[in-house]
Image (cartoon, grey):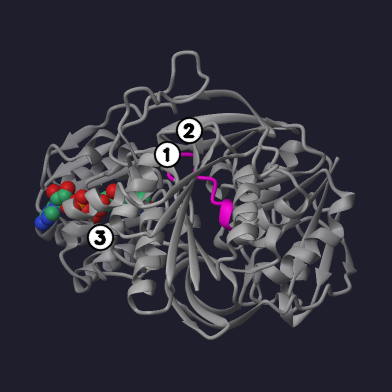
C-alpha cells in the first residue's frame, strides 16, 4: 500500500492538521508521501520532510498552486494518482474543495470526514451531524479520503528525514483566479487545534461583548469560537463558527457561553474532553452534554470567572 | 441564462434521528422530511437572480423516490419555474447524483448550477465539486456572496481562515453556504400555483447512468453518549472543579 497526502499550509507554515491526517494514514499502513503544492517559502517542504513516518515529500512549487484553487490542484493530484492505493487530505475547506474533483475524475466514490480507520478499506464517518456513525467499506482501486483532524492524534513533527522530489507543474487550468483573502489575524491559538476553546452564542447580545470571552481566552491560552446564531447576527466573523457546517473542535476544555446547544452546534464540539455550559436557562439542551453546568446570567458569571482566574 | 438548482429531500433538521435496530441505517419511516436547508438557500439565490433580470429560468431537479416530487413542489412554490424528478433510491451516492446531474446539464444547458454545499443527512460535501469536474467547469464552493458579470462570476468563499475571493469562468458550479441569503417562505397562493407548474419525470435508465452504490454500509450505530455531568452552584465551584477535578486549567 502507498498513500499520498495533500498537505495543508498557509503563510509558509505547514498546517498542524496535516499531522493528524498522517496519523490516520499510519493506521492504514504503507508508505506515506506528502504532496506540498505552491510553497514558495520552502519552509513547508522542509517541515514536511522532517515529519516521522513520511517516506517522500513531493514539491510542486508553482504559483498557480499557492491558493489551493481546486481546478489547478486536481490535474496535479491526478498526475500522481496511479502510484497510490489511497489519496488523502484533511477535511479542511481546501481538502473538501479539491478531493471530490479528484474522485470524480477517477470515477470513485469519496469517503468524507473519516473519524476511524477500521482497516485499509473500511472507515467510520459521522452522518446526520454526528448523531449516527456509519462504517463503510470501499472496493475502489484507489480510495479518496478526507480526514477529520480532531479524531486522530497529531503525528510527531520531528525525527524524519524524507527525500524531497520536485514535480513538474501541471499548469494553470485557466478556469479560476484567486483575488484576495480576508483572514483574521488573531494572536490566539487556531480554533481546531487549541487545547481550550471558549465560545459565545446569541446570548452574548453583541460583538463588543465578545471582549469578555477574549479576556478569559487570553488568560487560559484559549481560542474563541461561536455558534451560528452569533455569526449570523454579525457578532463575530464566519471563521469562528463551530458546528456541523462550521469547524469541528475537540479541545481538553470547551466552554459554551449563552449557547442553547442545538444539534448542529453539538456536532462541532461534543467530542471535547470537558464541556462547561454557562446559560441562564436551566433547561437548555447544552446542559445534557455539559460536565459542569452553571445556570447563571453570563453578564454576571463571565466577569466573575475572569476575576477568579486571577 | 438558465439556472439549474438540484434539491435533496432529507430528514428535517429539527428531528432527532434514530438508528435502526438492525444497524442498517437511520429510521426514515414516519419521520418529517424537508428540503435540505442549504438547497433552499440555492433556490432563493436563483430566484433573486431571476428577479434582478440576471436569469430567465429557474429549473429544479431532485433525485430520489416518488416523494421527492414534494420537495420539487416546495421549490416551485418558492417561485422556481419548472421541475425534473429523477426516480432513484433514497440512498443514492453523490458520485451517481453528479453523473445524473451531468446528463441533465447536457440536455438543458444551464449557465449556472447552484447547489447546497452539503446535505445535512450524509454530510458528504461532494456533489457540486464532482459535477464541476465531470463537466470541466470552474467551481465556487462554500459561497456567501455571488456576483455575475458577463462570462465571469466573482464569489466570496467561507474558508477556515476567514473569507476568500475568487473569480471563476462561466458556466460554473456554485455551492452555497448559510450566509448567502435567507430563503423566503412559500405563500399559500404560490403553493396552489406550484401544483400547475411543469414537472417532468425520468429514470436513471432514461439518462443511461449507472447508479449502483460503490460503498458498502457495514453498519450504522449511535455514537457513545456522554456521561451525565453536574450543575455547579457558582463560579468559584466551577473554577475549583476545573482546576482540581478535571485538571484542565
Ligand atoms: C443547515 C443548518 C446548519 C447549521 N449549522 C450550525 C453550525 O455549524 N453551528 C451552530 O452553532 N449552529 C448551526 N445551525 C444553527 C442551529 O440550529 C442553532 O440555531 C444555533 O446553534 C443557535 O445558536 P445559539 O445557541 O447561539 O442561539 P440560541 O439557540 O438562541 O440560544 C441562545 C442561548 O443563550 C442563552 N442566554 C441568553 N441570554 C443569556 C444570558 N444573559 N446569560 C446566559 N445565557 C443566556 C439562552 O438561554 C439560550 O439558551 C445550523 C442550522 C441549520 C439549519
- The subunit carrying tag 1 is B
Q: Is residue B1 visible to the viewer in this orientation of the structure? A: yes
Badge count: 3
Helix, strand or loop for disc 3: loop
Callout 3 and callout 1 share a chain: yes
Q: Which mark is residue B184?
A: 3
Q: Residues within 10 Å of mark 2 (few under 14, many from 20)?
A: some
Q: Is residue A89 above or below residue B213?
A: below
Residue A153 position in % (x across, y down): 60, 45
> Which one is in front, B91 or A39?
B91
- Which residue appears at 43% of the width and 67% of the height? B57
Helix, strand or loop for disc 1: helix
* Residue at the spot of label 1: B68
> Which one is in front, B174 or B77?
B77
Q: Is residue B63 left or right of residue A2?
A: left
Residue A294 position in % (x across, y down): 17, 43
Circle nearer the viewer, 3 or 1: 1
**Is disc 2 in contact with disc 1, using a CB cutoff of under 8 Å?**
yes
User: The magenta stretch spans which residues?
Assistant: B120-128
Q: Is residue A108 left or right of residue A222?
A: right
* Residue at the spot of label 2: B65
Residue B165 position in % (x across, y down): 51, 79
Amino acid at each position: 500500500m502507498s498513500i499520498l497526502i495533500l498537505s495543508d499550509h498557509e503563510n509558509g507554515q505547514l498546517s498542524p492538521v496535516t499531522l493528524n491526517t498522517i496519523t490516520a494514514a499510519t493506521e492504514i499502513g504503507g508508505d506515506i508521501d506528502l504532496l506540498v503544492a505552491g510553497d514558495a517559502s520552502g519552509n513547508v517542504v522542509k517541515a514536511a520532510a522532517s515529519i516521522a513516518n513520511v517516506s517522500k515529500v513531493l514539491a510542486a512549487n508553482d504559483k498557480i498552486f499557492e491558493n489551493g484553487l481546486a481546478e489547478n490542484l486536481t490535474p496535479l493530484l491526478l498526475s500522481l494518482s496511479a502510484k497510490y492505493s489511497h489519496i488523502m487530505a484533511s477535511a479542511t475547506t481546501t481538502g473538501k474543495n479539491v478531493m471530490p474533483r479528484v474522485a470524480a475524475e477517477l470515477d470513485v466514490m469519496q469517503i468524507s470526514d473519516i473519524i476511524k480507520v477500521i482497516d485499509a478499506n473500511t472507515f467510520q464517518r459521522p452522518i446526520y451531524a454526528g448523531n449516527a456513525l456509519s462504517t463503510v467499506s470501499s472496493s475502489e482501486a484507489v480510495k479518496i479520503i478526507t480526514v477529520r483532524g480532531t479524531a486522530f492524534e497529531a503525528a510527531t513533527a520531528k525525527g524524519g528525514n524524507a527525500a524531497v522530489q520536485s514535480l513538474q507543474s501541471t499548469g494553470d487550468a485557466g478556469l479560476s483566479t484567486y483575488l484576495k483573502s480576508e483572514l483574521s489575524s488573531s494572536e490566539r491559538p487556531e480554533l481546531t487545534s487549541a487545547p481550550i476553546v471558549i465560545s459565545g452564542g446569541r446570548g452574548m447580545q453583541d460583538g463588543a461583548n465578545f471582549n469578555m470571552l477574549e479576556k478569559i481566552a487570553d488568560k487560559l491560552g484559549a481560542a474563541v469560537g461561536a455558534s451560528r446564531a452569533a455569526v449570523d447576527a454579525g457578532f463575530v466573523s464566519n471563521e469562528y463558527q463551530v458546528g456541523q457546517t462550521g469547524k469541528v473542535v475537540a479541545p481538553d476544555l470547551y466552554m459554551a457561553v449563552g449557547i442553547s446547544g442545538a444539534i448542529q452546534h453539538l456536532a462541532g464540539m461534543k467530542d471535547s474532553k470537558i464541556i462547561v455550559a454557562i446559560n441562564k436557562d436551566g433547561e437548555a439542551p447544552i446542559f445534557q452534554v455539559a460536565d459542569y453546568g452553571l445556570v447563571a446570567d453570563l453578564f454576571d458569571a463571565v466577569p466573575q470567572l475572569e476575576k477568579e482566574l486571577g | 441564462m438558465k439556472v439549474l438548482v438540484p434539491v435533496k429531500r432529507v430528514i428535517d433538521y429539527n428531528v432527532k434521528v434514530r438508528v435502526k435496530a438492525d444497524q442498517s441505517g437511520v429510521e426514515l419511516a414516519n419521520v418529517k422530511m424537508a428540503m435540505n436547508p442549504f438547497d433552499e438557500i440555492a433556490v432563493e439565490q436563483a430566484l433573486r437572480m431571476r428577479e434582478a433580470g440576471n436569469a430567465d429560468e429557474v429549473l429544479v431537479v431532485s433525485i430520489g423516490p416518488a416523494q421527492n416530487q414534494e420537495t420539487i413542489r416546495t421549490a416551485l412554490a418558492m417561485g422556481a419555474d419548472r421541475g425534473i424528478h429523477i426516480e432513484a433510491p433514497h440512498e443514492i451516492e453523490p458520485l451517481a447524483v453528479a453523473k445524473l446531474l451531468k446528463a441533465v446539464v447536457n440536455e438543458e444547458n444551464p449557465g449556472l448550477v447552484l447547489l447546497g454545499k452539503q446535505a445535512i443527512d450524509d454530510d458528504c460535501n461532494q456533489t457540486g465539486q464532482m459535477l464541476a469536474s465531470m463537466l470541466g467547469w470552474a467551481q465556487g464552493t462554500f459561497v456567501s456572496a455571488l456576483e455575475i458579470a458577463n462570462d465571469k462570476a466573482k464569489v466570496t468563499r467561507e474558508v477556515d481562515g476567514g473569507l476568500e475571493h475568487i473569480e471563476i469562468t462561466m458556466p460554473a458550479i456554485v455551492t452555497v453556504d448559510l450566509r448567502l441569503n435567507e430563503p423566503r417562505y412559500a405563500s399559500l397562493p404560490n403553493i396552489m400555483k406550484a401544483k400547475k407548474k411543469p414537472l417532468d419525470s425520468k429514470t436513471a435508465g432514461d439518462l443511461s447512468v449507472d447508479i449502483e452504490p460503490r460503498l458498502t454500509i457495514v453498519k450504522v450505530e449511535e455514537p457513545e453518549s456522554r456521561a451525565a455531568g453536574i450543575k455547579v452552584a457558582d463560579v468559584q465551584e466551577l473554577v475549583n472543579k476545573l482546576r482540581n477535578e478535571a485538571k484542565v486549567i
